[in-house]
Image (tube, rainbow, N blue to C red):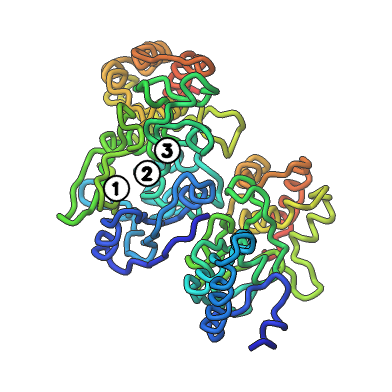
Amino acid sequence: MKQFQYTRALTQQSAIEAIAKPGTKIIAGGTNLIDLMKRGVTAPDKLVDINHLPLKNITATKTGLHIGALALNSVVSENSLVLQKQPLLSMALKAGASPQLRNMATVGGNMMQRTRCSYFYDTTMPCNKRAPGTGCGAMEGINRMHAIFGTSDQCIAVNPSDMSVGLAALDAVAIIAGKKGERRIPFTEFHRLPGDHPELDNHLAAGEMIVGVEIPDNNFAKNSYYLKVRDRQSYAFALVSVAAALEISNGTIKNARLAMGGVAHKPWRLFDAEKALIGKPATEDSFKQAAQIAMQGAKGYQYNSFKLKLAPATITEALKHAAGLA
Amino acid sequence: MEDERDHALPGSEPEAKDNSRRNFLKQSTLLTAIALTPGTAVKAAEMHVDEKIAAVFEKMPIKMEVNGVAHSLSVEPRATLLDILREQLDLTGTKKGCDHGQCGACTVHVDGHRVNSCLTLGVMASGKKITTIEGLAKGDELHPMQEAFLKHDGFQCGYCTPGQIMSAVACIREGHANSEMEIREYMSGNICRCGAYPNIVNAIQEVKEGGQAV
């Protein structure tokens, strides 16, 4: 690992000032960043440790749930407020990584984690995300784990986060701080598609940091489910995952939220499928129809075309679990 | 000063505080001399002389308590907790498997919580209490989880075992050892290439059901 300078930020203001300088990165849990630094994928000159900032709290507000950016994944997943108000988030978090990693990883860090595309990680391979302009090794390479939605001719990598899929489904808002103060953006607009700039994973500007997320209160707690399909039962990245949340009244769907992981460069919210579910009976037939709508525009590559069948099947299954039919 | 260096433990770095200026002078004189002869300059580069000089200035003081013993150390910011435990404190029970947070062989407890020490910077563990596999037994009396691993043959080659045991203790303390399925899920961060999983699960179940303090 390249040598770097290490400093501790004792105030949010000093952290923001420090990260405005090029070559400087924030470190929180470090579970992804240290790995990337060991492999030479990234080599910052300076790390700013923000773990001493007061951003760990999980609190109920008048309109929802506020979670500080430094709250640990393990703590959030077992927090009583989260379990009571947003069990889907807890399920998504528990589906990710290992207990040890969840004890280190933070909410903000989870949002910032990079793709696990093997061409991104292997510094001897071409990768437009790691080294813009070098090409995409995955496009015609081993692309079994890769995207089927929103790809560009530059990049077909997927966002690896489970937590973010849950937060995207739950209409969360990302709270971001910079020199000019705080701004709030919908979680679904935090991450971006690769387009012509696959090196950018999200819309965070230079000198900005995540300070928290907020989830508005909803009526999904009774009927929500996170289903993750992967190569082994635990501790593996998703081939396809689905966050499903329903509000059901007398067997009819009043409201629905759906998002998919492992299929795009960002958590893939299924707005059209959600609309199609509203007013329908909470049955397998309704779920299958919604799943077909969700797949519009999907495109498979040589080794990941199986996702074109796996994804709708996972959506249907997740909705059945959410509705209590499985 | 020379004596201090001679008494340094094998594999441990000498303290950089008092003799840093002297080392710098010695090494920079060396650099000036060898700069004239390309052959020795290459040799100096191979020996990372320049990096060693830089390291003297780039080390940071940290304090941590490891298995109940307080340590004041001088570490590079890039040194992981795993490397500090193994190479500076000679606590080689904690194993380096993948070194990328994928295998769990490096699992230790930091302030009572299990973490991957290969992905933890030593500078970030400053001021914390660390427990490694060496800190579980009380003298010659093994920890109940160590006894259970022996009884149930919870290993073959043994390389993953320290991490498995640290995780297993945490698994019970966290309240995640209530069924075979739950144990398997909450032990999934520890990989065993010999495939001793059924015996590891049996060991954890026995300790959990025995109700002993872990």
User: Is there CB contact under 8 Å for labels 2 and 1?
Assistant: yes
For disc 3, the chain is A
Counting residues from the start of the chain, the first of labels 1 and 3 encountered is 3
Residue in the picture at 32% in, 59% down: A55
Residue in the picture at 64% in, 60% down: B39
Residue A246 shown left or right of residue B149 in the figure:
left
Residue A172 shown left or right of residue A133 in the figure:
left
Q: Is residue A62 above or below residue A309?
A: below
Q: Which residue is mark 1?
A: A213
Residue B108 at x, y percent in the picture: 62, 61
Q: Which residue is mark 3?
A: A130
Counting residues from the start of the chain, the first of labels 2 and 1 encountered is 2
Counting residues from the start of the chain, the first of labels 2 and 3 encountered is 2
Q: Which mark is residue A111?
A: 2
- Under mark 2, the amino acid is Met
Residue A166 at x, y percent in the picture: 38, 36
Residue A109 at x, y percent in the picture: 40, 49
User: Is there CB contact under 8 Å for labels 1 and 3?
Assistant: no
Could you tell me how far apart the alpha carbons at marks 1 and 3 are, in whole angstroms? 27 Å
Residue closest to the far left: A180
- Under mark 1, the amino acid is Val
Residue in the picture at 31% in, 18% down: A273
* Label 2: how many Cα within 10 Å (few below 14, some 14–19, many 20+): many
